[in-house]
Image (cartoon, rainbow, N blue to C red):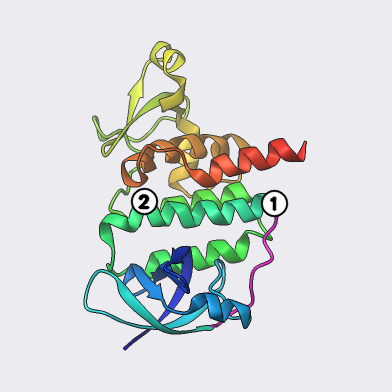
Amino acid sequence: MIKQPAFVLHSRPYRETSAMVDLFTPDFGLIRCIAKGVKKNMSQGQSLQPFIEYQIFFHGDSGLKNLDKYESQSLPLALQGDALFSGFYVNEVILRALRSEAEVEAESLYEAYSLALSHLQSQSLEYVLRMFELTLLEHMGQSYEWDFDFKTAEPIEADSHYGFFVEQGMSRVSHMYAAKNPNNCFYGQDLINLAQRDLTHASTLKMCKRLLRLALRPIIGYKPIQARELLKQYKHLSL
């Protein structure tokens, strides 16, 4: 039997009384477990919920594990509105990114995830999400030198425009090219700020959202993020 701290990323019913649960752990990354009798535990106030850190005990050689026991290690986060959907977004992004690397050590990403959850209620959501996305890129081996032109190896110039090229980085483009391709072109000063992890400028934070969405696509896939679609529906209903 193996013991690990863990967060629930996703769960769904499995047979009559059980659930299939995707769990995020520091030593094994993403693992999938069968939680037997979990519906019975729900009636006793012991359900598995997202945004709570658990101590889990599981066994199994590979593939689908068996969840033997779980104990909550923290109080539930009372996330609401945009903060709640931001939490769902982070869960979905991790799940999609790690599916191809299941059961691989992810201690630094686990720490970043735990920190992001704790900040969703107290800090700018955009800032928290962008910082987490940067950590996810690094964990997946997609670190970029945002303040260097990958073609020339020259530093980024603050007043120039640069295009983003997947798995390569940034390269200077003409103002005409930037005007015709606004979705994947970015201002030099914002890239310099990003390289310094300075997201305090509104323009940099807005740019970072566009840029990281492009950078994450090869990792999480091109299908729409469900949490993002749910947020749109929620805001529409709230009008």
- Residue sitting farthest toward the top: 176
Q: Is residue 64 above or below residue 212?
A: below
Q: Using residue 26 as the reference point, say whether residue 42 is left or right of it.
A: right
**Label 2 sits on residue:** 137
Secondary structure of residue under mark 2: helix
Residue 152: in magenta span: no
Is most of the magenta stretch helix, strand or loop? loop
Q: Position of residue 72 (x, y in %)?
A: 55, 82
Q: Position of residue 84 (x, y in %)?
A: 63, 55
Q: Position of residue 231 (x, y in %)?
A: 62, 43
Q: Position of residue 182 (x, y in %)?
A: 46, 21
Res. 112 in view = no
Secondary structure of residue under mark 1: helix
Q: Which residues are magenta?
A: 72-80
Residue 78: in magenta span: yes
- Residue sitting farthest toward the bottom: 1
User: Which image quadrant for residue 151?
Assistant: top left
Q: Residues within 10 Å of mark 2 (few under 14, many from 20)?
A: some
Name which of mark 2 and mark 1 comes first in the sequence: 1
Relative depth, front residue between 113 and 1? 1
Residue at image x 49%, y 39%? Answer: 208
Res. 117 in view = yes
Quadrant where the C terminus is found in the figure: top right
**Label 1 sits on residue:** 81
Relative depth, front residue between 172 and 238? 238
